[in-house]
Structure formats: structure tokens, C-alpha cells
Image (tube, rainbow, N blue to C red):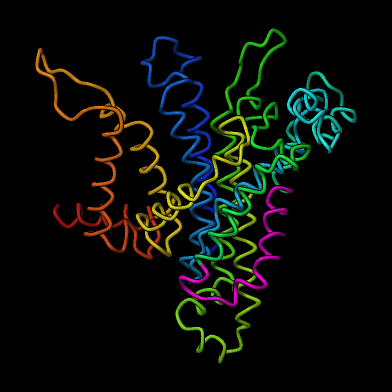
Amino acid sequence: MKKDRRSVKIFAGITALLLFVILLENLSGMFPNLPQVFQPTSPLFTVLKKAAVYSLVAVSMNLLNGFTGLFSLGQAGFMLLGAYTYAILTVPTALKEQVYYLFGGCAFDFSLVDMFKGMFGESGAGGAFAMILGSLIALILAGCVAGFFAYLIGIPVLRLKSDYLAIATLGFAEILRAIFQWQKLGPVTNGANMIKGFPTFSDFNITNSSGTVLLRLSTFVPFLISGLCILLIILLINSSYGRAFKAIRDDEIAAEAMGVSLFKHKMMSFVISSFFAGVGGALFAMYVANAQAKAFTSVMTYEILLIVVIGGIGSVSGSVLATFLYVACSEWWLRFLDSEQYIGNFKVPLLRNGFRMVVFSIVIMVIVLFFSQGIMGNHELNLGAAIKKITAKKERKR
């Protein structure tokens, strides 16, 4: 009974959040005189979109590093696989010759979106449904491709432990990035050039025949997809498989003595984590409106790892909270540090291009040094319990 109530509360909370995102995104259309921060092009919505994408990747990394105890640094490589899979499968056939102009066209003269448009029609509701269905299937296939490669490399590397596993997976990601920029693979990956022209978040906005936006959904879509994926990860963590993952993390010898197959469960965790990283990579490609291998560097993996550490290794809600704080600081709140500022005629010293990252690095060092367990440690956010505690304290004071 308690579990049913908890599930209803979680579902109600997620629904309320998604409705709030839709309302927030469409406020400027309802009230044109609102401040700039509520306009669709403001940093607020940039942060929300990117944080939604990064939160999924952070939680997928936490599943592997925090809940299974496998120190992997290959997240950027699996994101790359997901991004390219999505881009290649959804670029319209008519644009492929233009996108792959250096190579005379794409080796895959096929588009999921065009295929469904042929079935449901190119205009009106049929065209919109075709775009949505094609994009969703491409997202799933992006995760499947990342999971397949994870399975292949997992066979040798999962026999390694600790730093050796981290180095092996990091090397895989770097090798993959170099291969995807190889000019001989140009007809597939477009070489070192970017792939663009595929459906992005803004394509999910509802418009009329003249192109005027009636309902903005470009922020709602990443929230919805990331939220559903994170919910699936939470269900996995709370299942018997999740308990096996935690047993491996705590003590491999004891877990094996209790009948847990170490290699099987490590492989399962590695493949599932990579699947969701691939979906996150596809969402990232939709966010930046292109897919290019040079964007998926080891720095991206370190960013995701830092978010996991700040949020708390072994806490899903910690990873999500840390993602939004990290992205908001790096993309919005500390931006003023990169430009010269004056107080009257006095020029504030040190403020110049790049100073933002200096301050940001110091803040991160303080968090890591004085909050070694992260924001949440290995605990989860429970708003219901927190509200009960606050109300109980008020009643005691009365």
C-alpha cells in the first residue's frame, strides 16, 4: 500500500513538473511584456534544455560508478555513438547530398522521418506524427547502438578493475572519436564535418500554417524523455538487479558467495548505462542541432563525472540537482565574470574572458574538499518527508 502511494506521488510530481515547464516556456506568448529572462531565447531555457540532457547522462554514469562500483570514463564515446546514430537515421533524404557534399552523398540513403512521412503524409498532423515517431525510434536505436558497442568492449575490459577499467574505457572513447573523424568513413560519418538538418527540439513546437508558434514544447521534450529514462533507471535500481549491483559495489567476494554472477551483472550494468548514455548523446545532438565528433571529448566525460561527485555517488536525485546547479553556474550565473564590469568610473579588477572558469573551478574545489560525500551523499531527495519535518517543527513551537 505504501509503495502504491509512493508511486502515485512520484507520478503526480513528474506530471506537475512537466506541466510547469510547458507553462514556463509559453509565458512569453501569453504575456509579451514579461522580462527578458522568460523569453524563449533567454539563458534560462538554454540551461533547462542542456541540464535535462546532462542529467540523464549523469544518472546513467552514476548507475555504473555509484551503484555498481565500476569506474568507467567512456561516457563521451557512447554519447558520440548515440548522436551519430540519431543524426544519420533522421537527416531527410533530400538534404543528405547537401550535408555530405564532400563525399557525394551519404552511404545510407534512408531516413526514418521520410519513411513515416510516406506512410502518414508530409503535411499537417500526419507530417508531425511522422517526425515524432521517426525521432523516437531513432532515439531508441541510438541507445541500442551504444549498448551493442558496450557489450563488445565489455567482454575484455570488464575483467579489469579500478583505474585500469577507467583507462581502458577512456581510451575506447578517444579511439572512437578519432575513427569517426576519419575521412575514409566520410560517406557514413561525414568525416570531421558536422551532420545537421535532422529534427531538433524546436521542431516539436506546434505551429500554424504560416509558421507562427502556437505552443512551445522545445524545453518540455528533453524534460519528458530524460524524465522517463531516469524513471526507468530508478525502477532498475530498486529491483532485484539493482540490489545485485549494490552488492557487487559493496563486496564482490560476498556477492559472489551469495550467488550473484559478477560478470553477468557487471555487463548488464555497463550495457544499460551505455544505452542511456547513447540516448543522452542523441538528445545532446538535438540540443546543439548538429553531430560532430570533436564535441565529444574527454572533457565532456570529466564534466559528467564531476556532476556525479558533486551530487553524491549513489544518489539519483543528487545527480539531477547537481546537473542543474552546474549547468546554471557555467552557462548563466557566472557569465558576467567573463566581461569587464564598472562601478561608476571604477573598473573591477580581474574580470576578463576566461575568469569565469577560474572562479568556477575554485567553487568546485571547495565543494569537493568540504563536502566529500556530495550534496546528497548516497541519500535520495524526499520532499514529502522534508515537508512533514518542517510542519512537525512548527507544531512543536506552537
Magenta-colored stretch includes residue 78: no
Q: Is residue 137 above or below residue 154?
A: above
Residue occupying the point 28% across, 42% down:
360
**Image side of residue 336 versus residue 207, left or right:** left
Where is residue 140? Give x, y as percent. 71, 48
Residue at the spot 38% in from the left edge and 14% down from the top edge: 34
**Up-down relation of residue 212 to residue 73 (above or below):** above
- In the figure, is residue 215 to the left or right of 373? right
User: Residue placed at 55% from the left, 46% from the top?
Assistant: 227
Residue for point 48% across, 76% down: 249
Extent of the magenta region: 141-165
In the current view of this chain or complex, which residue is farthest to the right?
119
Q: Is residue 81 above or below residue 385?
A: above
Quarter of the picture containing the N terminus is bottom right
Residue that sits furthest to the bottom in the current view: 257
Residue 161 on the magenta span: yes
Pick the front one: 255 or 150: 150
Q: Residue furthest top?
A: 210
Residue nearest the observer in this picture, 235 or 284? 284
In this rendering, would 94 be left or right of 76?
right
Residue 389 % position (x, y): 27, 57
Indicate the position of residue 346 as horizontal and vertical percent values: 9, 17
| Image side of residue 350 versus residue 161, left or right | left
> Magenta residues: mostly which secondary structure?
helix
**Image quarter of residue 337:** top left
Residue 113 figure quarter: top right
